[in-house]
């Protein structure tokens, strides 16, 4: 019996079955079409037409693990739904959560994934409730900066004299605006917070 994906490249079911279920092909999952010039892959729903239930479960689990490790598939931290990243700068889940496709956490623009991860770790360690993307938390997160010496996270505190000077407990002095070690030249840094 011939079988094909939506591309219309027909091959016998036995060939498709061995192609999809070969354990040594698992690093190539999702399995590509048997036509070498085709870019389609065997989805879990297409594999359901070929595989028995235990093999299908194994195929689906392996595909999810591979795509998740490549950051092509991410899991919503709120509801667990899977999403393809597709190069998007932000993903919105059906549950309403905005997700960062680079780190699979709540969307945290304009803060980098590394700073956001350290910030949430700090909140967790100090039993502070986790941030959410309310206007207050976005405002708080957008004022975060990182010490260039020890990589500790700081929050910029507004002051009436708008000073960019930051002093870390490790002893490093740095400019909030440009994140360089503070020198006499930085006293005139024109960047604002």
Image: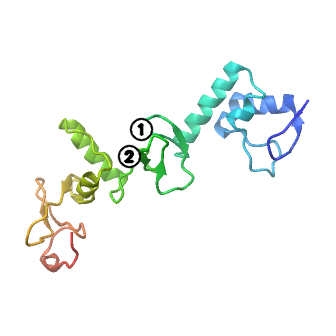
- Say which residue appears at 13% left-offset and 60% top-offset: 157
* Percent of width and height locating residue 59: 66, 29
- Say which residue appears at 43% left-offset and 47% top-offset: 99
Residue 28: give its label.
Answer: none
Q: Compared with residue 68, is residue 155 higher up or lower down, i.e. above or below?
A: below
Q: Compared with residue 74, is residue 54 higher up or lower down, i.e. above or below?
A: above
Residue 77: give its label.
Answer: 1
Provide the secondary structure element on which disc 2 rests. loop
* Percent of width and height locating residue 77: 41, 38
Left or right of 136 on screen, residue 45: right
Q: Which residue in the structure is indicated by mark 2?
A: 106
Quadrant housing residue 30: top right
Provide the secondary structure element on which disc 1 rests. loop
Mark 1 nearby-residue class (10 Å; few <14, some 14–19, many ≥20): some
Position of the C terminus by quadrant: bottom left
Left or right of 192 on screen, residue 162: left
* Mark 2 / mark 1, whichever is N-terminal: 1
Position of the N terminus by quadrant: top right
Q: Are marks 2 and 1 in contact (CB under 8 Å)?
A: yes
- Say which residue appears at 42% left-offset and 44% top-offset: 97
Mark 2 nearby-residue class (10 Å; few <14, some 14–19, many ≥20): many
- Say which residue appears at 51% left-offset and 36% top-offset: 81
Quadrant housing residue 155: bottom left
* Percent of width and height locating residue 7: 81, 47
């Amino acid at each position: 019996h011939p079988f094909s994906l939506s591309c219309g490249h027909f091959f016998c079911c036995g060939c498709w079955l061995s192609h999809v279920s070969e354990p040594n092909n698992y690093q190539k999952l999702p399995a590509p079409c048997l036509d070498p010039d085709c870019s389609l892959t065997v989805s879990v729903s297409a594999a359901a037409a070929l595989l028995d239930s235990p093999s299908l479960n194994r195929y689906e689990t392996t595909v999810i693990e591979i795509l998740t490790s490549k950051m092509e598939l991410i899991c919503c931290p709120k509801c667990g739904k899977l999403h393809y990243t597709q190069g998007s700068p932000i993903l919105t889940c059906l549950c309403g959560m905005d997700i960062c496709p680079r780190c699979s956490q709540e969307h945290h623009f304009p803060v980098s994934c590394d700073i956001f991860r350290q910030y949430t770790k700090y909140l967790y360690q100090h039993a502070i409730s986790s941030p959410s993307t309310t206007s207050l938390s976005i405002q708080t997160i957008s004022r975060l900066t990182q010490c260039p010496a020890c990589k500790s996270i700081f929050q910029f505190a507004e002051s009436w004299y708008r000073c960019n000077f930051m002093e870390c407990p490790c002893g490093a002095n740095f400019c909030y605006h440009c994140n360089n070690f503070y020198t006499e030249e930085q006293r005139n840094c024109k960047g604002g917070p």
